[in-house]
Amino acid sequence: MPLRLLRAVLAASLVVLALPVAASAQSSAISAYPSPGTVSAGPATQISLRGAPARRLGTIRVTGSRSGRHSGRLRAHSDGRGASFVMSRRFRGGERVTVRTGLALRGTSNGDYTFRVARIPSRVTIPNLILENIDAKLVRRFRSRRDLAPPFVNVDRRAAGREPGYLFLSPKSKKDQKQAGPMIADDAGQPIWFQPLPGVEAATDFRAQTYKGKPVLTFWRGTSRQGIGVGEMVVLDQSYRVIRRIRTANGFRPDLHEFKITPQGTAIIIAYPVVRTDLRKVKGARKGLAVDSVIQEIDLDTGLVVFEWHSLGNIPLTETFSVPRGGPRLPFDYAHTNSVNLDTDGNFLMSARNTWTIYKIARATGRIMWRLGGKKSTYKLPRAAVFAWQHDAHRRADGAITLFDNEAFPPIRKNSRALALKLDERTKTASIAGSLVHPRKLLAATQGNQQNLPNGGAMVGWGSQRTLTEFSPAGDVVFSAALSLGFESYRVYRQPWVGLPRTRPKVAAADEPGAGTDVYASWNGATEVASWEFSSGSSATTLKPVATRARTGFETRVTVPGVPRVVQARARDAAGNVLSTSAPTRVR
């Protein structure tokens, strides 16, 4: 073979061989959080590294420009694909932190990078400006559960074509604090399960999810003002027992807006730390306060952070449609992230209410891939498709982006709507793929969601308007209900659920002169009860069955003959099997 030809063949071979090497190098890159260049990391942050097992991450050196060298411990993530370097002490506000590694870190040239630590005020005042100053009125009362007083779910339409499942709500009141908490109800509006929270605490984003292949209930609980929450995330098993809590992550308390469990056993949440920053670009104070919308992904098994992203440093203040108010002591909530969900490619879809924008964020780097809506939209929207003050962005099965378009606070259009937008990747344009409006043209100033149902329909929660509506795939209303006046629910879901409480049923009885004794039975959270068997007697040892009744709602009543001293109720399923029996209870 001529030498020239041999050299050409060898050169071609080298090019071919170089391709998999480059691909391998790219796939072995490690992602770091806080990401390189972050401007508002928390003083108690971890250094989280994703893309390789803990044993392959080597030595991590962390140095603060004011706090000096930091010792710590490298803790493995439960999936074996990363670890968090957990510092033994906190950073100082405003300092620059340098992280040195021997790794191929995304966003760096030599495996080293820096980030800034936020200056977080020790105390923040947020005024409680109530939009709908309405007294909460009617609540349910039960003889067998006098400790429970949930609001009514008043159903005005139940038509054929509804998706199977229960209603998941988190009712709360604004003015006078009635009982607030997560609630499951059936299509008759009857409670299935209700858990009142103490004091002024409330719950949001209550729903059924799957964790480790098993059904669970999840919700946020805590206190909030002006849509800024401080609380914890709670996971319950089918017996309503707490199995997981998220109280802090990188020193940040969870906000009320999102709690999504991924198939990988992680939880996506939002935090709203208030940090000191320069607000002059939006005509605010030079030494002002801003709310930093932080997305976090938490390893539920270990509590470690596997992803973190900050709006500050990624979304300019000038994208907001809000304005700073109240002077430098009141925080400016310029972005107000209110939903985060995984897109079909594993990256994040995020809704920021106050920028009127849906953002797609790269999971590996934190880079904003595109914007939909707002002042810097990647996609051109026709006038009819423009949305404002929105919530709850998702990717639908057909590829459309769905959201709840509030259009209010302050009002932009005359009514809210559940909107679906089709994106054309080639032309970078968006068009309306569907729009659902309440028959009464409701305008929801706050909250709201659009749940895409398996049958192609949608469950829409109208937020501050206390109403929930299920639409068929054709857009017809097949279910409609409203909470008692003065109550509202941040989101509403329709989902299947099987509740198997460990508690026993409750029974109560009252002597009705000349008409026998009324006996009441209930079992908070039980979904499998089909009928109740009632027993009565002069004592606990003389109880005998005297009546059987089909379950008629949360509480079932029966009148038994005579004036027994003790009563008892036994719950049976549809096959007649005994599920549980109440304690013998004296007649009052």
Image (cartoon, helix red, strand yellow):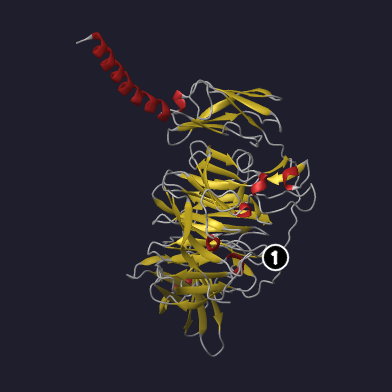
* Relative to 504, residue 346 above or below: above
Which residue occupies the extreme left position in the image? 1
The N terminus lies in which quarter of the figure?
top left
Residue 84 image offset from top left, x and y in percent: 53, 31
* Relative to 405, residue 107 above or below: above
Kindly tell me whether residue 372 is visible in this rendering: yes
Residue 237 image offset from top left, x and y in percent: 46, 53
Looking at the rendered structure, the secondary structure element under dot 1 is loop
Q: Nearer the viewer, residue 112 or 431?
A: 431
Q: Nearer the viewer, residue 207 or 556?
A: 207
Residue beneath the point at 24% across and 12% down: 6
Q: Nearer the viewer, residue 4 or 322?
A: 4
* Relative to 293, residue 145 above or below: below
Q: Quadrant of residue 85?
A: top right
Q: Quadrant of residue 5?
A: top left
Which residue occupies the extreme bottom position in the image? 514
Kindly tell me whether residue 217 is visible in this rendering: no
Task: Using residue 228 as the reference point, say whether residue 520 is left or right of it.
Answer: left
- Tag count: 1
The C terminus lies in which quarter of the figure?
bottom right
Residue 86 image offset from top left, x and y in percent: 57, 30
Amino acid type of disc 1?
Leu
Residue 426 image offset from top left, x and y in percent: 42, 48
Which residue occupies the extreme top position in the image? 3
Q: Which residue is mark 1?
A: 131
Q: Residues within 10 Å of mark 1 (few under 14, many from 20)?
A: few
